[in-house]
Image: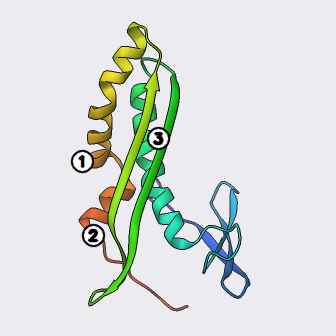
Amino acid sequence: MSEDSERSVQMSRLEKGRFDVVNPRGGRMVIGHGGVDEAFTPVELLLAAIAGCTATDVDFITTKRAEPVRFDVSITGDKIRDDLGNRMSDLVLSFDVAFGDDDAGRAATERVADAVRASHDRLCTVSRTVEVGTPVETRIA
């Protein structure tokens, strides 16, 4: 893996079920398990990663034409347990995007569907990884 392609985060345990996550640029967040406080759970982070990846793609593509007056994104899914183990199913990513009623706004509006499709089909690393399925190797130091 080249230095340009590698992505990483480091985690340190704070207490039972809570971890401090740090990215290479110094950004931090706390994740927790169980959803008992404001900390994001790993499943919520997965949902946020999928939504955030496509949202940023759509944002970069459409705002070349105009700034949105509304740009809201939501994602839902069902956490299930079946023969394959615990996993998420029925993921639905929804966009509510509006631009001004002028030529630039109409041009941006016309790009939304194509931008969402391009992100889903090839641009968004997160959803592409989930949909294609990538093995996760685990190691013990």
* Neighbourhood count class around disc 1 (C-alpha, 10 Å): few under 14, some 14–19, many 20 upward: few
The residue under the point 43% across, 8% down is 102
| Residue that numbered label 3 is attached to | 56
Q: Quadrant of the C terminus?
A: bottom right
* Neighbourhood count class around disc 2 (C-alpha, 10 Å): few under 14, some 14–19, many 20 upward: few
- Residue 115 appears left or right of 99: left
Secondary structure under badge 1?
helix
9 vs 62: above or below: below
Task: Pick whichever, 53 or 140, lies toward us.
Answer: 53
Q: Are marks 2 and 1 in contact (CB under 8 Å)?
A: no
Mark 3 to mark 2 CA distance (whole Å): 22 Å
* Number of callouts: 3
The residue under the point 34% across, 61% down is 91
Check disc 1 and give the amino acid type: Asp
- Mark seen at residue 26: none
Task: Tell me the quarter of the picture where residue 33 sits.
Answer: bottom right
Instruction: Of the two numbered discs 1 and 3 on the same chain, state the one appearing first in sequence.
Output: 3
- Residue 29 appears left or right of 45: right
Task: Tell me the quarter of the picture where residue 118 sits.
Answer: top left
| Residue that numbered label 2 is attached to | 133
94 vs 71: above or below: below
x, y percentage for residue 106?
Answer: 36, 15
The residue under the point 38% across, 21% down is 108
Check disc 2 and give the amino acid type: Gly
x, y percentage for residue 87?
Answer: 37, 78
| Residue that numbered label 1 is attached to | 121
x, y percentage for residue 81?
Answer: 36, 85
Whether residue 1 is visible, yes or no, is: no
Q: Quadrant of the N terminus?
A: bottom left
Instruction: Of the two numbered discs 2 and 1 on the same chain, state the one appearing first in sequence.
Output: 1
Instruction: Of the two numbered discs 3 and 2 on the same chain, state the one appearing first in sequence.
Output: 3
